Structure formats: structure tokens, C-alpha cells
Image: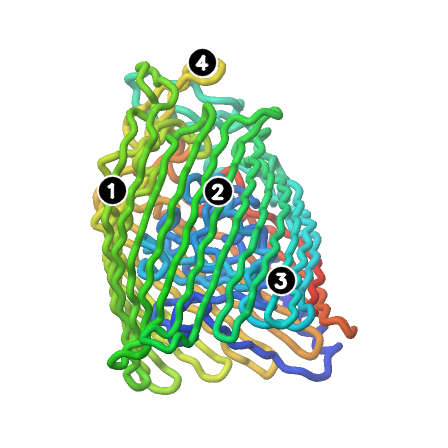
Amino acid sequence: MKLKKITCALFFMFTFPAVAADKGTLTIPTTAVTGNPLGVGSDQMVVPISILNGRELSLKRENTLAETLNNIPGVSNSSFGPSVGRPMIRGMDSDRVKILQNGVNNLDASNLSSDHGVSIDPLIIEQIDVIRGPATLLYGGGAVGGVVNAIDHRIPKEKLQGITGRGEVRYGGANLEQSNAAVVDVGTGNFVMHFDAYNRDSKNLRIPGNAISNRLESTEVWDPAGGSLPAPPADQVNPGAYATYPTNHGRKKLLNSQSETRGGAVGASMIFDRGYAGVSYAKHQTKYGSVKEPGILLDMDTDRIDFASEIRDLGSFFERAKFRAAYTDYRHHEMGGGEIHSTFKNKGIDGTFELAHAPLMGLKGILGTQFDNGKFDAIGHEAFLPNSKTNSQSLYVYEELPLNQHKMTFGLRHGKHAVESKGGGEPDHDGLAKFGDSSRKKFNTNNAAIGGLYALNEQWSLTGNLSHNERAPSYFELFANGVHTATGVYQEGQTDLKKEKSNGLDGQIRWKSGQDSFSAGAYFNKFSNFIGLLSTDSTEPVHSEEGSEITYLKSTFSGIKAEFKGVELEGKTMLTDYVQFNVRGDYVDAKDKTNGGYVPRISPLKLGAGLKYEFDRFGARLDVLHAFKQDRVASNYNYQGNKELVTDAYTNVSMMATYKLPTQLNLEAFTRANNLLDEEIREHTSFLKDIAPMGGRSIMFGLRGEF
């Protein structure tokens, strides 16, 4: 039956456009890497990089940044329902993956908690650069997993005379999304203004069957009658001490998975002959239901002010100066029954200043400094963190040495970090302040990397990168002490944590000939101190707001030895003048070398292939992605009262068709169908994989245009 469905989809996609079209060819535009300070192309980058922009990005936009990037090798979605998801790269998440907006840190609380969304909507993003592997030198200490840089052009950098813009509307999908976005730039030559606005409304997600997986229902901690399991005696060790799953999270629809998003921005720049200076203000608001807790609504509100400036051709040893900074005011309310249960606030400023120097003995490079100053507040009965402050300053240097058609790169970074807890908090069951006395921790980090690109000939090249990476512990890893409702466990930080350290090796072989290309790579990261949230054999009694006592499992942030290794591949080739064949795959293996077993929430082996067709006004695409069964689960890990469960394999078949309307306006209609086989898809990297599957079979219609 599945084969028949795939055959029908192929027939529709590759016969209907062929009958209607009579001329044309498939074109693949080249892409500039905005994230590289020296302005080199992606083919000249030593570290693996993937780029989405233009029409390709427009057609791949999803609800969240992570879901938009989910088809890039090595990238997965740590979703907490359809409205929340943070990118994981090579099995790493949280502070090991930097999320930037225009090269400056995107400040929210998504690194802290799995139920906090990323405050970037893909609807207005113009380009996304994804760097896989250690990128700690240029983008901040600790980005050993990688970097996601979302670029929105809200601060114009080039002269414009007149008006340009784009717009998009779409409807459908598994969550019946209704969304639209408009981006407009208005210029009078040297002075350019930017405007954008967007909104997105979605209903409860349609799913193939029951929200709760068969594996979860069969566990001993599952209570088929609903409600919570009784707390065990204080001296009894019970890994299922507390489970709060209601009987039903939905069948055919995922309950409380709706969302509403609004946002927009205004920016302006003055363009000079040798540079620019500009500022922008952006607002992002979203309300979404907590899939884990029916009846709970999360309200996220972000205000962000950006400033950027660049001066070129300085006429001295330093050829170019660039400054970028952003101030962010982030607020997050968790509400139920019309009342606010808890509030999280995060305010801070982050910025970089770079100087590019003239060639020196063949070397081209930059000197830079980065600073960030953040203040985090948690208010309410469910607050499991003290109010805290974080201050960091870093100096870095990055150099490239061309050697004919080859190249070497190297860099150093030194950072100073201070993390402060205000202490205090409500009394615990022993009558002591929940977060103890105020305290301040300081860390010095040093990062280094050396790499190279060796061109075998005009088509083939080899790249390699060796790095040493250090990351200072975050405020929640140091000072957490309380029940984290999103995880269902009692989280405990440790103030004596040492900085996270790792050494990494990354290599790729690349081939490119015209529009055809292929790359395959392998990597290995060895952590002498990997900070993870590990389960313990103890429980913690907690008094609820109603006065009752509930026992929770305790998990502690601890340092372990760990190894991450894996392979990635992607390629594309033109089968005919109009048909392109694509292939991709990735595999990661992450082991806990201290306790044995595996690191939790690691993506399984994934292999995918696709066909892309464009001829005249018509386009079509078919993609098939198979994720294998993931049975390499963590034993020293607990989430919501359960050990990590095995995740079954799935095959996701999707298709797309586009048509450029024969009008004077540059309009394109598109339709996109996902999960054509209506499979039960549970992403192993998702925190809620066993109570919140991905969407079922769906179709979306849209119209996009540019002027």
C-alpha cells in the first residue's frame, strides 16, 4: 500500500508539470556566507556549513526554527510540541548550540527550559547559516555543537532607490495554520528604511492516532486511570515516583497544541560610500499551549533593539571595522485558569567589535572582542532558579593563510565569565532558604582551533579541523534547586561544577562539478567534563500550593566523561536538464564514558533522498526520509518519571508543487504535503516524543510574491 502511494505521488509530480510546460531549466543560485568574517564562500569554509535562503528557504519555512532546519544533515528538532523547538546539532543542545540573530546572541530562555520557545519566527528570516561542529572562536565560547545564525536584514546595508519587498500567505498543514508576512524596504539612496510584520495562528495538531505511545502505556509508571501515581515511602527508591500524565493527551488531535504569534519590526540605516550605520526595533509575541499540561498557556513577549555599523577601506593596517550589538527584554508567563503561575524574565545586552587587518606575511584575519551582560529573574511558586546575573568578555583572533589553491586557518579565544546568584527564595522542607546565600562564580575559558583545506584538483578537496573547546557552566547548571514542571523532576545544580572541556576532530571530503556536488564527513568530540542532567537514586518532597506534599525524583547537573562521534553526507546531481537528485544522511553516537551507556535524546541514523523538477513555470519535489529505530537509550536519565524509551523507525514522505503565475507581478503559488503515508512519527530528540507525535498527513497551500 505504501509503495502504491509513493508511485502515485511520483506520477503526479513528474507527469503533470511535463505536460503543461514547454521550456525552461532548473537553476541553482550561488550563496554567500554572511557568517564568515572574511566573506569567503561556503566552498572555502573549513568547517561544515549549510545555508538556506531565497526561494528555497521560503518553501521550507515551518512553525519553528528547528523544524525549518530539520532536513539539514546533523540537525534535529528538540520539540516540545508543534510550537516549540530548539535546534540540536550532532546530538548537542542548550548552550552548546548558539542561536544568533544577525551575528548577535538571541537572548531568550530556550536554552534553560524545553518548554520555552525560540523568539525567532522563520516567516521574516531572509537567510539561515548553520555551522556544524565547534565554532567557539568567532561566535562565543561553548558552541561546540554548532551555530545557527538567522539573518533578517532589518538593518539595511546597501543603498536603495525606491521600494522593494516580499509577501507571503499560507493556509493548511497538520495544525491548520493561517499565516502571513510582509517585508518592505524603502530607500532614497543613502537612507533606507525597513518594515516587516507577520502573524501566525494554528489549531490543535492533527496526529495519526493516539498521542500517547504504546511503549509509554506499557511501562509500570503509566497510570491508565489518569492522575498521578502515589508517592512512595521516603526510604523507597522508585524511578517512577511521580508521573503526571493525564489519561488522554488526545486522539487524532494533540490537545492544547494551539498557538498565536504576532510580530514586526522597523529599522533604518544611513549608507555611506565606505560603510553603513543603522538601528532596528523588533517585537515578538506568541501564546501557545503546553502539550504536557492541558489547560496551561505560555505567553512569551520579546522586545529587541539592534545596532550595527561597518566602516571599510580605513587606509591603515586595519582595513575594516564592524560593530554589532543588541539589547533584549524577554518575558515569559506560565498561566492556568486565567492566573499567572510563574514568570521568567531575561534582560541583557550582547555585542561584538571586529577589526579586519591588511595581509601580513600572507595572513588575512580579524581581531575581535565580544561582551554580554544578562540578568535573569524567576518569579512564582514554580520558579526553580534564583535571580541571577551573567557577565562575559572575550578576545579572539582568527587567521587564514592561502597556500596557492590550498588554505590553512587557525584561531584563539580567551574569555572571562562571572555568574552570580542572588540566593534567597521560599523556605524548603527544612526551613532553609531555597537558594541559599548569594554567591558568585568566575571562570576563564580558552579555545583554540587549527584547520585546513587541501584541493586535490578542481573538483575534489579535503578539509580538516582540530579544536580545543571550553565552556563555562550556565546559571541554571550551577544554581537550579527545585521542581522543573516541564521535565517532571526535581533539578539540582552544583556550585562546584568545573568548566566543560572537549577536544574535537572534524574532516570532510568534497566534490563539486558545475551544479553537481557531494560531501561526506566524520567527526569525533571527546569531553573530559561534559555537564549533563543525571538522575539520582534519591527523591525530594515538595509542598504544593494546595498544601499537599508530593515526592519528586531528583536529577543533578553533573560532570561526566563523554564521547560524540558521527558521520554526515549530502549531495545533489542533475539527472537531466530539469531533474535534480538529492541525497542526505547522518548518524551520531554519544556515549557516557563515566557511567556507561549513552547520552540521552540522540537522533537515530537517518537516510533521505529526493527528486526536484523545474520546467518553465512549474516545479515539483518529492522527498523520502527514513529514520531507523533508536534503541541506544540512556540508562542514567529520567524525564517526567520515566527512563528514556526506545523510539520506533519511521518513513516520512513529503511532496511539493509550485507554479509561477503568468502575471506582471512576481507571484508563485505552492502546495506542500507532509507525511503522505500518515505514519506515527516520534522524534527521539523530542522531550515529549511519547506523548506528542509529529503531525499526520496534511496539505498546505500558499502564495508568495516579490516586488
Mark earlier in primary sequence (3, 2)? 3
Circle nearer the viewer, 4 or 2: 4
Q: Position of residue 681 (x, y in %)?
A: 53, 49
- Looking at this view, name the residue that lies furthest to the right: 663
Nearer to us: label 4 or label 3? 3
Tell which tag, 1 or 3, sits nearer the viewer.
3
Real-space CA distance between mark 1 and mark 3, rounded to the nearest whole angstrom: 42 Å
Label ID, residue 548:
4
Where residue 442 is drawn, which disc sits there?
A: 1
Position of residue 671 relative to residue 242, above or below, is below
Q: Residues within 10 Å of mark 3 (few under 14, many from 20)?
A: many
Q: Check the image and report above or below for 686 versus 641.
A: below
Amino acid under disc 4: Ser
Q: Nearer the viewer, mark 1 or mark 4?
A: 1
Label 3, label 2: how far apart the Cα atoms are: 43 Å
The residue labelled by disc 3 is 193
**Circle 2: element type:** loop
232 vs 124, nearest the viewer: 124
At label 3, the amino acid type is Met
Q: Picture coordinates of residue 423 (x, y %)?
A: 33, 27
